[in-house]
Image (spheres, rainbow, N blue to C red):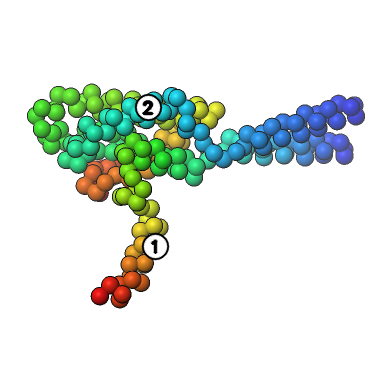
Amino acid sequence: MKKFSIILLFAGLLAACVTINIYFPAAEAQKVADEIIDDVWQIKDGEQTKSPKAISEESSETTDNAPAAD
Amino acid sequence: MKKTIMQYALYLMTFLTVSLAYAAPNLEINTPAINAVKDSMQSRHNALAPHYQSGAIGLTNNGFISVRDAKALPLKDRQGINALVSDENSDRKKLYKEIAVANGHPEWESSIQESFAGRWIDKAKSGWYYQDASGWKQK
């Protein structure tokens, strides 16, 4: 019985491991897509296409700087 | 009996170690096949760019491009546009497939295609057309 549970444990670990292995790395795929699209469309760093997060960060920065601008 | 169980355990541990080594998160995109497709697409982009801008072609929601409004094309370009679009699409298909294959998971092709579909649209310049569930939209 004890041996059987050891086998079960290993089988469980194995299954978990296989799951990790076949899991599609979505975030990594997006990064790779960005890289390739920038190359194909020849988008330079900083030009165009900021992620929504970058845009909101930038706009809040602009607001902070606004009083200093005049 | 005991020996058999120990043997199994050993096999499993070996497999576990090997699998963990393979679970590295980086996707490989630097292969000759991928670079060749990229170069081909890059050199085609100059021909496509004005047509994205005019709305003659648009980005589809599945990672390809399609002719959207042939009337937006100058007469001289109308003849060649279908070939241009289908060349681009076959390169895109090849790109998705080669990335999947380069990473040892040919079955990832459609997931990779999906990832790209969203990113092409996000990175499109303003004025370009893209497709969503309800039809063509302009950025």
Which amino acid does the dot numbered 2 rest on? Val
Residue A36, image x, y percentages:
39, 37
Which amino acid does the dot numbered 1 rest on? Glu
Residue A66, image x, y percentages:
30, 72
Asked if marks 1 and 2 touch (Cβ < 8 Å), the reply is no
Q: Nearer the viewer, residue B55 or B21?
A: B21
* Quadrant placement of the N terminus of chain B: top right
Q: Chain of mark 1?
A: A
Q: Quadrant of residue B4?
A: top right
Q: Chain of mark 2?
A: B
Q: Is residue B106 left or right of residue A69?
A: right
State the residue position of label 2: B37
Identify which residue is drawn at 72% across, 31% down.
B15
State the residue position of label 1: A57
Disc 1 is placed on an element classified as helix
Q: Nearer the viewer, residue B102 or B57?
A: B102
Disc 2 is placed on an element classified as helix
Mark 2 residue crowding within 10 angstroms, few (<14) / some (14–19) / many (20+): some
Is residue B31 among the parts visible in the rendering? Answer: yes
The outermost residue toward the right is B2
Mark 1 residue crowding within 10 angstroms, few (<14) / some (14–19) / many (20+): few
Identify which residue is drawn at 28% across, 42% down.
B131
Q: Nearer the viewer, residue B43 or B127?
A: B43
Distance from Cα at disc 1 to Cα at disc 2: 35 Å
Q: Quadrant of residue B51?
A: top left
Q: Is residue B72 left or right of residue B19?
A: left
Count numbered badges in the picture: 2
